[in-house]
Image (cartoon, coloured by chain):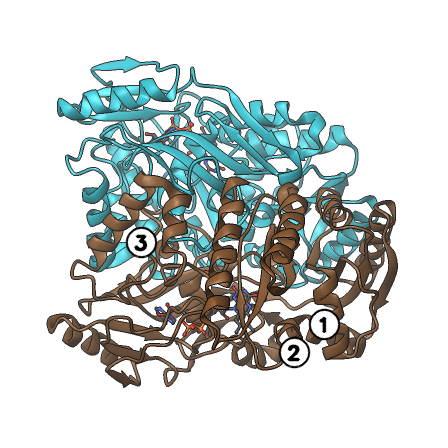
Chain colours: A cyan, B brown
């Protein structure tokens, strides 16, 4: 969707002092600065729409400090989610936020990422304790104070929260202090097919209302399920489906499984299938994580674009049904998959990048879907961010005073408008 | 600690339009505006240090919208925590954040409150979905967009987070959209005495590491326990003590109880006592909630002042031991109670309000404790806020660039410095 525009130069700083000097230099000379994590972002966040210098942070990849008894870790911006979890392997802890892609953790901070298990562990917003940020003019800000890693605070304005989701437009994140969680003692996964989208969503609401601490609850529509069956050699029924995962002690899992089965059966589910051993479980979640590629394989040679709306859960059935109708009407090919416990879903649209007319149809479809979500009290982006393409929708979402306030924030921290220009606002 | 300074006038608006008109009027005339929730704040937040108009929001006390399937509710600023939970009684949902006092929910937003069960349900920061805010000049801001109540979003800058904990210095909160939780199916409480502070804190860390989903875990030092025994007619051993509560199904509780007992016994606990029926449980938590009054009763005629530091959990034993020594050395009377799962504790200091020398000693003690917390990577306030008295500590906590950024934020939203002046910054 976003045609890549290269920067004038790329630099690979080795440490925060270099980042600070680089920022000050660029800023002093009126040169745009584009922070780069691992480039897995899907909203064109690293496109250099006004040229400038791309600051690639992948060489700063040290884990600076681990405090297991305090459930916290400090990482440099080149550390990815998988690298961190590999490092934590024997600590009994893990970092759960999981966007599928092996993104950099600071990039995940920058986009306000979440993913499959936010329903239980929260999003990046809930799991960042402190940030080290190089401001556009080179000054160094510690959003919760230098070296602090307390679990909660009521001291002054929440600067940490301000930088989570700022998409590189307010400063460069050069270190993140993250909240860790105990690694689950045991896990069980399951798939479950439903007669209708409504039945799958109703089950989700009932599971949450029953306080079953589900760790993951993902929706796949029939087209997505079919594609995953083919791509990942699963054998699931082609129907609206939930993929579930539970974390806990063996005993706790047994109860969660039983309750969930009761709830889903009550809602008309069939083909309930539990994956108790690690291998089956991995296979299932590998399939879910490969949903993107499974979708692409439906139309070889195509590129994918993923929408990302999020609505109050009770409004999901209506928007999902509408979306499937819109898809049909538009003549586009698309699959639907969603973090249904959060009310967030993606429509993966397959498009021939050489067909400008089809690209326009994809764009129109995505905008219509964004507006449908807004009409249902939702947001145009649950986790991917605004980037380049959703700036108009953002205005419709937050209203005039909200936009003014965001513009004031941007002008306050980046008065020359050089931090990742053209994004968000 | 904070001698009350009355405003020049108090007004009781009935709706948001009136709040907006009042703000615009005051702002146009250069008159300070002081928002008032229920006045339970403990950091002098409602003192009119520069005179002005106190906007008392208690008459705006409607519950505007309840969406049970979406786990959300919209409340006006006069709605208190207890009023909301009474309203929710038959819905199967509740709002868990519990500062003990029956504070207004918007006041709790304003101070970034938490309390006894933040360890499981999070603080106000984690439980606010949207805010309606009257800005100082009377404009109306919806921090997540008008009428929106999605569970997560990555759309633009996090304005909601900016107003949580802003202590009335950036605007008047005229409605809050809050996240609700399923009411627990069953609950068990317990008390447990330890040979040392270290053993109590180690148990806490081990319980969290074992992922036992404890709903409340509160520390009381020997002096506090003794005071509660007398005031609330309990019969607990006078020792460092944990009060615990678990929420879940009967079966899940049995397992949590067993694991916790194993962990605490391993750490040398004695006198473990479970309160399984509702009456015993209420008695225990009433005693915990009356800790403030129990402390006051140790010295009839005295007033109380509560410190509020929060440190990484592993640093709790050292700061608690130091604090008890400081207390002794200062000659002051004080009890200690804490939300130990968050690393947050209060020292309730008893002071003769007519003795200026003693007031000075209390102030010096509180500042020393704040600095001890800062030296241990902590914060000077876990949940009460900065208010009037901790402005110097805030500067030491966040550093020069942090303070500059906070001052810029204040100047941006309140250029004439009329919103609750003299607080936070
Ligand atoms: C197959 C696939 C599946 C995905 N699934 C999900 C999902 O389920 N949930 C989800 O949330 N996302 C998902 N994503 C999107 C992507 O993984 C996230 O947006 C991720 O957070 C981007 O991280 P990154 O390090 O790759 O950032 P980049 O792509 O490098 O950058 C993204 C934005 O953040 C800024 N940025 C990056 N690093 C920094 C820094 N250190 N300081 C300041 N700004 C910075 C950039 O300027 C840019 O604006 C998926 C992506 C793919 C390819
Ligand atoms: C016995 C006792 C125990 C307590 N225990 C705890 C505890 O465990 N945890 C905890 O967090 N707190 C605790 N507190 C403190 C207090 O209950 C909280 O700070 C609470 O959030 C204050 O709410 P309020 O409505 O009383 O606010 P107020 O006292 O009326 O105001 C507090 C501040 O918020 C501002 N404010 C209030 N309402 C608004 C609004 N609508 N818009 C903008 N600004 C507003 C005021 O200007 C002021 O700065 C305790 C207090 C007492 C008396």
Marks 2 & 1, CB-CB < 8 Å contact: yes
Residue B198 shown left or right of residue B401 in the figure: right
What residue is at 49 percent from the left and 47 percent from the top? B371
The numbered dot on residue A213 is: none
* Residue ID for mark 2: B297
- Element carrying mark 1: helix
Dot in front, 3 or 1: 1
- Element carrying mark 3: helix
Dot in front, 2 or 3: 2
The numbered dot on residue B227 is: 1
Q: Where residue B181 appears, x then y in whole percent?
A: 59, 64
> Is residue B365 in view?
yes
Q: Determine if marks 2 and 1 fall on one subunit.
A: yes
The numbered dot on residue A371 is: 3
Marks 3 & 1, CB-CB < 8 Å contact: no
What residue is at 29 percent from the left and 55 percent from the top? A397
Quadrant containing the C terminus of chain A is top left
Q: How far apart in space, not on screen, are marks 3 and 1 (Cα)?
A: 59 Å
Q: Determine if marks 2 and 3 fall on one subunit.
A: no
Tell me the quadrant of ligand 1: top left
């Amino acid at each position: 969707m976003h045609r890549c525009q290269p920067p004038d130069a790329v630099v690979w700083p080795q440490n925060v002092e270099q980042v600070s000097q680089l920022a000050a230099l660029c800023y002093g000379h009126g040169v745009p600065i584009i922070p780069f994590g691992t480039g897995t972002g899907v909203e064109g966040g690293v496109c250099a729409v006004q040229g400038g210098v791309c600051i690639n942070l992948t060489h700063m990849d040290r884990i600076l400090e681990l405090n297991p008894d305090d459930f916290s870790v400090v990482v440099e911006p080149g550390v990815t989610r998988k690298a961190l979890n590999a490092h934590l392997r024997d600590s009994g802890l893990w970092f759960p936020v999981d966007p599928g892609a092996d993104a950099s953790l600071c990039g995940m901070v920058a986009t306000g990422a979440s993913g499959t298990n936010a329903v239980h562990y929260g999003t990046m917003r809930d799991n960042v304790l402190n940030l080290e940020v190089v401001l556009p003019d080179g000054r160094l800000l510690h959003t919760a104070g230098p070296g602090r890693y307390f679990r909660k605070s009521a001291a002054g304005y929440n600067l940490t929260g301000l930088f989570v989701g700022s998409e590189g437009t307010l400063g460069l994140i050069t270190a993140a202090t993250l909240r860790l969680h105990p690694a689950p003692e045991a896990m069980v996964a399951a798939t479950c097919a439903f007669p209708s989208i409504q039945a799958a969503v109703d089950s989700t609401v009932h599971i949450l209302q029953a306080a079953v601490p589900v760790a993951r609850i993902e929706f796949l529509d029939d087209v997505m399920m079919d594609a995953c069956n083919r791509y990942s050699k699963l054998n699931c029924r082609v129907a609206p489906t939930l993929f579930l995962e539970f974390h806990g002690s063996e005993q706790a899992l047994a109860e969660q499984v039983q309750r969930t089965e009761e709830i889903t059966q009550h809602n008309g589910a069939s083909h309930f299938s539990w994956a108790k051993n690690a291998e089956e479980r991995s296979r299932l979640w590998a399939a879910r994580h490969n949903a993107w590629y499974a979708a692409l394989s439906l139309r070889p040679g195509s590129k994918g674009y993923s929408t990302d709306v999020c609505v109050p859960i009770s409004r999901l059935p209506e928007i999902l049904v509408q979306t499937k109708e819109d898809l049909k009407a538009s003549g586009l090919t698309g699959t639907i998959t969603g973090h249904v416990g959060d009310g967030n879903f993606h429509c993966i649209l397959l498009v021939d990048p050489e067909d400008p007319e089809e690209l326009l149809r994809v764009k129109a479809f995505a905008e219509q879907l964004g507006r449908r979500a807004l009409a249902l009290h939702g947001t145009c982006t649950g986790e991917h961010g605004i980037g380049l393409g959703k700036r108009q929708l953002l205005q419709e979402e937050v209203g005039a005073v909200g936009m003014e306030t965001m513009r004031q924030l941007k002008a306050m921290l980046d008065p020359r408008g050089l931090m990742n220009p053209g994004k968000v606002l």
